[in-house]
Amino acid sequence: MPMIDTYYAIAVIALMALITFALRALPFVASRWLQSHPAVRRLGRFLPLAIMTLLLLHTLVGSAREHAAGPWPELLCAGLAAALQWRSRNPLLSILAGTGLYVLLRNLGAG
């Protein structure tokens, strides 16, 4: 089995590093254009909420299928987190309370 030429391997690694760096630097280089583009602004208004909603639904459905109690513990915890966020506007409190209740319910055998 022939060995890979050392210079060829170094060139390939250098090219991969250059492409990786360019891809990571591109958003910073294009940030001025991205900030002023109307399509990017429109996406920035609704996309984070849409992604979080999809992640939440995927998690709720996936967890509900794995446990005999059904979706009730997940819905209760999501409701608690939503209510706390609505009242306090404190994401850390909402996340911690919802997660804490979920862990408590799962460990007490609610699912």
Image (cartoon, rainbow, N blue to C red):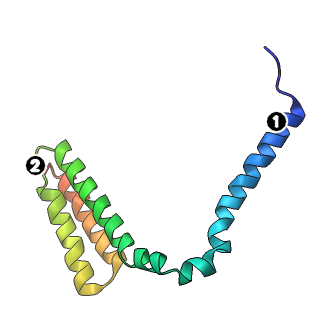
Residue drawn 17% across and 49% down?
64
Vertical order, 8 against 1 (above or below): below
In which quarter of the view is residue 42 placed?
Answer: bottom left
Looking at the image, residue 92 sits to the left or right of residue 27; the answer is left
Q: Which residue is mark 1?
A: 9
Residue farthest along the front direction in this orientation: 38
Q: Considering only order in the chain, which callout, 1 or 2, is on the residue closer to the N terminus? A: 1
Q: Amino acid at mark 1?
A: Ala
Vertical order, 87 against 102 (above or below): below
Question: The residue tagged with tag 2: helix, strand or loop?
Answer: loop
Instruction: Confirm or deny contact between disc 2 and disc 1 (CB under 8 A).
Output: no
Residue drawn 33% across and 82% down?
90
Residue drawn 27% across and 54% down?
59
Question: The residue tagged with tag 1: helix, strand or loop?
Answer: helix
Marking on residue 106? none
Q: Amino acid at mark 2?
A: Ala
Q: Quadrant of the N terminus?
A: top right
Q: How many marks?
A: 2
Residue farthest along the top direction in this orientation: 1
In which quarter of the view is residue 47 placed?
Answer: bottom left
User: Where does residue 28 sit, x and y in percent of width and height?
Assistant: 65, 73
User: Where does residue 46 sit, x and y in percent of width and height?
Assistant: 35, 75
Dot 2 crowding, Cα within 10 Å, few <14, some 14–19, many 20+ = some
Looking at the image, residue 3 sits to the left or right of residue 101; the answer is right
Marking on residue 69? 2
User: Where does residue 9 sit, x and y in percent of width and height?
Assistant: 82, 35
Vertical order, 103 against 52 (above or below): above
Rounded to the nearest whole Å, what is the CA distance between mark 2 and mark 1?
Answer: 55 Å
